[in-house]
Image (cartoon, rainbow, N blue to C red):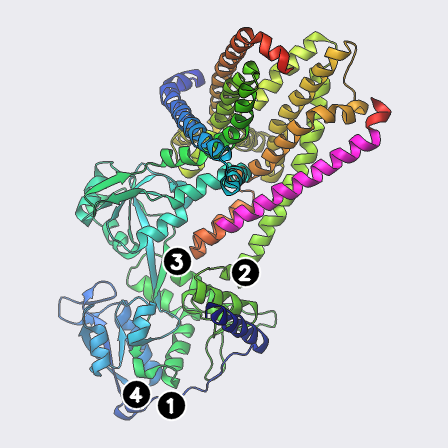
Amino acid sequence: MRDIDILVTWTPYLLEGLGWNIIISLIATIMGILLGSIFVWIKFRQSSISRRAGAVIPALLRGAPTLFLLFYLAILIPNEISLFDGQITLVVPIWLKAAFALTASPLAFTAWNLYSSINFWKGGQRGAAMLFIPNCMNGFMITFLASSGASLVGVNELVGRTSTVIKTFDTDYSLIFYSYAACLFLCTALVLKVVVRRIQKMIEGRFASSLATSN
Amino acid sequence: MKKLKFIKLVLFVFLSFLAGSETLQAAVKSALLEKIRKDNLITVGVKTDFAPFGYLSSDGVIQGFEVDLAYKIARELGVGIKLVGVSTANRFQRLEQGAVDLVIATAADTRERRKVATAIEPGYFGAGVTVLLRPEVKANSWQELRGKSICALQGAYFNKGINSRYVLDLKTFKTIGAAQSALKQGGCVGFLYSEMAIQRYLARPEFANYTAKIDPALIVPWAAFLPRSEKGTDFEHLLGNMIADFHRTGVLSELQKKWPIANSKFLRDSRQLWSKTDEAGNLICKRSVGAEWPVECREKTFITSADVQGVGAILRIIDEKIGLDFNFVSDTYDRKRFLYGILTSVLLIFLSTLMTIGLGILGAMALTTKRSSTRGLSGVLAFCLETTPPLLSMYLVFFGVGALLSAKYGVNLSAFWVAVSCLSIYHGAMISKTIAASVELQKKDDPNYCFSILRMPQILETAGVGIDGILTNLVKASMIASAIAVPELLTSTLGIISDQGNTNEMMILLFVLFFGFTSVWLVIIRNVQVIIIRKYGNQNA
């Protein structure tokens, strides 16, 4: 079997893995934005304690290495959670634990950036405020790349699947398959970059006057 | 009141540290041993239903590994032997009632059992848990099973311990039968259960081609037990010395071969431990009359603050009183590997930072050059490099390129340098883009502005914050090096967790250390930037 045929045969399996990377990153980014927004809301409160909590917790999460969170949450969160005396059992799959761990980075990002965006908005600099959206998408790309680390705790995403395929064949295929996986990451990142550019241009066009003021 | 309690605890810790004394009690004479010698007979309780350790042959004779061991003990004592069949349910009752003098009946040595009987240290055998793997699964270590679906028995005592050490995806079933059915139907890749039971399953035709190559974990020693009243007597010590000798001389390994029992990790490790000698050739695991075995030879589970001294005692007290297990600090091997992990991480971060800055500056030169083809090409290259996850690039270089170089030229790549290079290339690409963006910003004011190393102080004024962020990420990303077995901090932490099971303590320590690394590193980088800007900023603007 030629190398190219082998790659073609395994492409659907690997693409499914890439799909998991995207799903995990999406969940992490959405949860991160939601939780980060809560911290921003806390920051706007009058009480100095809540303001401090709104700043300290995201700062701690920002300093936590992703791999540390992946391992710790994989161990800390039980695989099954029993409710109502064991009548209902909630299964927590490993990919969901990984998504929780990857939430830390977008959470910290939102907590830092949404606060200034809201202040920009209040000050009439709507264009500068709206740049939060493409920045979030850039954050999504960072989370997407970091999601490859989930393979180390056993999530069956692209890198994990690539290693499995290599084990099935032979280590001679390592170079081909890992290069192919890198290409898949690159293509996805390219698509994301184009989307981010478009959104950025759209915002710049729509809020051109306010962006000029903010500059 | 609470304050008083705390002061008492601190005083206790301090005094025990100062005293550093190990209570040495001379062993008392054993009444039981005297009786055995007088009667010229020892009565030993053994199993009759657990082959190959103790079971009935077709002609009704009790035989097995433990029976042979009982005979050897009697021979060493120079007395006759009477075997009495005991069961799991009644073995300790029979001992307490005086119906048997000694029990050798597949009894695991646990804290609870030590409350009702006297365990002989060391254990004569030990068994842990392992995984029965489906034929197509090629795993040789627990690490290879991370996140994989493993069937297990609901409520098994080892589920939690194994999961917190090796991050498995355990699917628990109410019965062994249900778990095994799921395994056969492919509902999971393996079945987590007692090592001894799995060895028996492997002999069954239904599990032909299944394997169990993973070294057992959570190994619990099996001990011979004397009645509770024999604690601290010369009989307890005599039997302990005998069993230690059986390990050293290979008597127990021979018995393992005779009763075909799968190669036991416990026996392998024990033989090595009890035969270890110092530079002068003296045995390390030996004791003077009446004393306990040296701490490094004993089962860690049973060591208390009274058995150790100095820092070890303080850590044990903290563990016993507060429940925080940092005992690894007093274990020479664990302490060394943890310190080595810290050192490797610091070195990895330091070298990667230097290389990242160097590559970032080189990349920025290429990205801002006047030649458009070079600019375009380097732009594409920078994009490719910054969108390849460092983990993937490490695999690509270490396993892909490394395998090729090894096969063709016999060159083996160093995992450490692969990690340094991959981390530097990824973050270097980011820094080069940040610098290039800063140069573009300067060009708005001065269209003839071009990048040069002498203008770095001025560029740092706008790109400094971005560079800080990238270098902070570099510190955090350095943990990825553990994926290619670089012995850095995460690798050593996970290793200690596997051995000690102190997940929370180690993970919190790891977080604190990395938070410290990041903060200190950031302060250093910012100060260096400030010095550069202040000293050279105006000269080269």
Nearest-to-viewer mark from 1 and 3:
1
Q: CA distance from mark 1 to mark 3?
A: 35 Å
Task: Please state if B225 lies on the left or on the right of B386 as rendered.
Answer: left
Nearest-to-viewer mark from 2 and 4:
2
The residue carrying mark 1 is B29
Residue drawn at (56%, 32%), measured in percent from left and top? B402
The residue carrying mark 4 is B32
Task: Tell me where residue B467 sits by quadrant.
Answer: top right
Is residue B512 located in the magenta-colored stretch of the structure?
yes
Amino acid at pointer 4: Leu
Q: Main secondary structure of the magenta part?
A: helix
Quadrant where the C terminus of chain B lies?
Answer: top right
Question: As displayed, is residue B1 above or below residue B399?
Answer: below
Amino acid at pointer 1: Lys
Q: CA distance from mark 1 to mark 2?
A: 37 Å
The residue carrying mark 2 is B329
The residue carrying mark 3 is B265
**Disc 4: host chain:** B
